[in-house]
Every structure is written in C-alpha cells, then in structure tokens.
Amino acid sequence: MRFMVMVMATKETEAGELPKPEAFAAMQEYNEELVKAGILLAAEGLSPTSKGARVKFDGEERTVTDGPFTEAKELVAGFSILEVGSLAEAIDWVKRTPNVFPNGEATVEIRKLMDVEDFGESFTPNEEIAKVKY
C-alpha cells in the first residue's frame, strides 16, 4: 500500500522560512532511514502558497486565484510517499519523524493513495495507461 504523508503548513513555512541546518540534517538522516528500509518513494517540500495558484472548476468555467491562501493550518507544506504494509505501519514511521518546526507544533496527515483495486470491478483501465507505473 502507498500512503501520502502530508506535512501541514505553519506561519513559518508560509513566510518562506527554512528549517535550521540541524533540522535539515535530522530530516536527511530520517529520509535515509526510509530509503534503507525500501519504503520511501518520494519526498518533497513545497514553496509557500504566495508562489502558487488555485484553479476553481465550475462546469466549463475555470477561475484562477493567485496565492497566498489563508488558513495555513489547512495547507500542505511538504509531502512524502511511503510504500508500507498498512496504515498502522505508516503511522509508526511518521511518529519517528524529527520535529523540525521552531515552535514545536506540527501536524502531519496520512492518506492512502488509491490503487486500481480500490475502484472495484466496474473500473476497466485503458490497457496502455495501465502499463505505466507512476
């Protein structure tokens, strides 16, 4: 099973503040541990929403809103994708993550990525696209 681990934004991440060098080192060490365990598929930080945009869909209409966006606690600041056996295993790994936030508070959300099997029997994928491993 693959899980997306999302680190939620803080005032600091939205202001573009980077972690201290020792925090980067701690995260690098942790990520190396995930790689050695063979479960890390991806890990990336995201730039602040001030450098992004949102596209709202309403029927055929598209509305673009430039960042920044409000409510930092509901925004994603970074993510990783882990391939583990269960949600419980993903939680165990996330609990070992070093806390790199200066004020000590952080929220991490874990969500299972959908696999073809999750869509049931009515889903019939395009054979050419189904061959592609994302």
Image (cartoon, grey):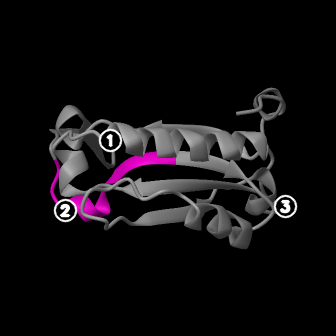
Give how far apart the Cα atoms at labels 2 and 1 are. 28 Å
User: Which element is circle 3 on?
Assistant: loop
Name the residue furthest front.
Answer: 22
Q: Which residue does the numbered mark 2 point to in the structure image?
A: 71
Looking at the rendered structure, the kind of residue marked 1 is Glu
Residue ID at (81%, 26%): 128
Q: Up-down: is 89 above or below 117? A: below
* Image quarter of residue 99: bottom left
The image position of residue 53, as x and y in percent, is 24, 37
**Residue 44 appearing in the image:** yes
Classed neighbour count for the residue bearing mark 3: other residues with Cα under 10 Å, few (<14), some (14–19), many (≥20) = few
Taking depth in this image into account, of 67 and 117 the one nearest to the observer is: 67
Taking the image as drawn, is residue 46 in sight?
Answer: no
Q: Amino acid at mark 2?
A: Glu
Number of callouts in the render? Answer: 3
Spatial CA distance of label 1 from label 3 is: 30 Å
Q: Are marks 3 and 2 in contact (CB under 8 Å)?
A: no
Q: Looking at the figure, which quarter contains the N terminus?
A: bottom right
Image: 50 above or below 116: above
Q: Pointer 3: what residue? A: 121
Q: Kindly indicate whether the residue at mark 1 contacts the one at mark 2 (C-beta within 8 angstroms).
A: no
Tag in front: 3 or 2: 2
Residue 121 or residue 71, whichever sits in front: 71
Of mark 3 and mark 2, the one earlier in the sequence is 2
Closer to us: mark 1 or mark 3? Answer: 3
Label 2 secondary element: loop
Q: Nearer the viewer, residue 99 or 52?
A: 99
Work out whether residue 66 or residue 59 is closer to the camera in this orientation and state it: 66
Identify residue type, mark 3: Glu
Magenta residue span: 69-79
Q: Position of residue 116 (x, y in %)?
A: 78, 51
**Mark identifier at residue 60:** 1
